[in-house]
Image (tube, helix red, strand yellow):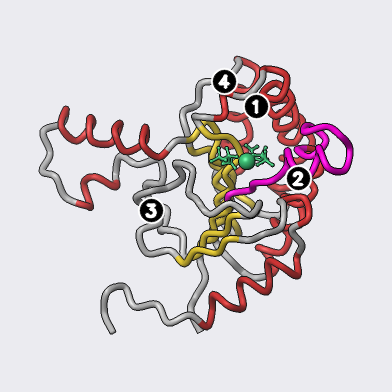
Amino acid sequence: MNPLNHVAIIMDGNGRWGLKHKNSRNAGHKAGLQTVEKIIKETIKNKIGYLTLYAFSTENWKRPKKEVNYLFNLLENFLINRIEELSKQNIKLKIIGVKKFSNKLNKIITHSEKKTSKNNKLQINLALNYGSKFELISAFKKLSKNNESINETNFEKYLQTKNIPDPDLIIRTGNTNRLSNFLLWQLAYSEIFFEKKLWPDFSIKDYNRIIKSFKKIKRNFGSI
Ligand code: IPE
Ligand code: IPE
Ligand code: MG
């Protein structure tokens, strides 16, 4: 049985779900938040140490302003209303991505990260304004600026995921088989599961089914 210490999820399909059920993409984002809550609980139950959630990519700014604003409002309210409870559950929150948001959201994020910084049951990495290519370029720039020798250990110090083990398992919902600029370095040896279901329909049962399959995989890491 493989140990499972880090799950990463590309939570895709909210927009399509919203259009189908409520004729509104934003309704899908709201519904998707319920799935986030369920998955966090189940991740703790499964004693997994890290959960990385792709919430907003550097490319998602291309979406209509109305949708972008709705997403950030949803996130703001989630953090304002839930951070106390998440902290009580011994959850640590970390944002990965470029932290360039409104002053209000910046403050909420700083407060949420600080409040939960000493917690150690589950670390949630929320990928927000995250893009893997930008992360990699920034890391290369820092290496070269500091004139350090180019090797994996030095390089990884400059990634947003510094000190976080690589994901063992990556799940993408929404019936699309691509990585969309997510953790391109860190996923080098992760087990990839593409799920047909849209994120709001993704259930605890689906999650546990994937975890069960993951545990049985023969992971080679290049060996035999
Ligand atoms: C949610 O799914 C992911 C985010 C960018 C917030 P989408 O909004 O991409 O949903 P689809 O793929 O359009 O259905
Ligand atoms: C990936 O989903 C980003 C998030 C889930 C936050 P997208 O819906 O943005 O991906 P593409 O554009 O279909 O590749
Ligand atoms: Mg999508």
Residue in the foreground of this view, choosing between 47 and 55: 55
What amino acid does circle 3 point to?
A: Gln
Label disc, if present, on residue 186 of the rendered structure: 3
Looking at the rendered structure, the secondary structure element under dot 3 is: loop
Label disc, if present, on residue 19 of the rendered structure: none
**Residue 215 horizontal/vertical position (percent):** 54, 79
Cβ(mark 2) to ligand 1 < 8 Å? yes
Residue in the foreground of this view, choosing between 13 and 34: 13
State yes or no: residue 201 in magenta: no
Q: Residue at x 57, y 42 (%)?
A: 126
Label disc, if present, on residue 32 of the rendered structure: 2
Looking at the rendered structure, the secondary structure element under dot 1 is: helix
**Residue 9 horizontal/vertical position (percent):** 58, 53
- Mark 1 crowd level (few <14, some 14–19, many ≥20, 10 Å Cα): some
Q: Earlier in the sequence, mark 1 or mark 3?
A: 1
Indicate which label's residue lies in the foreground, 1 or 3.
3
Q: Residue at x 65, y 70 (%)?
A: 46
**Residue designated by label 1:** 108
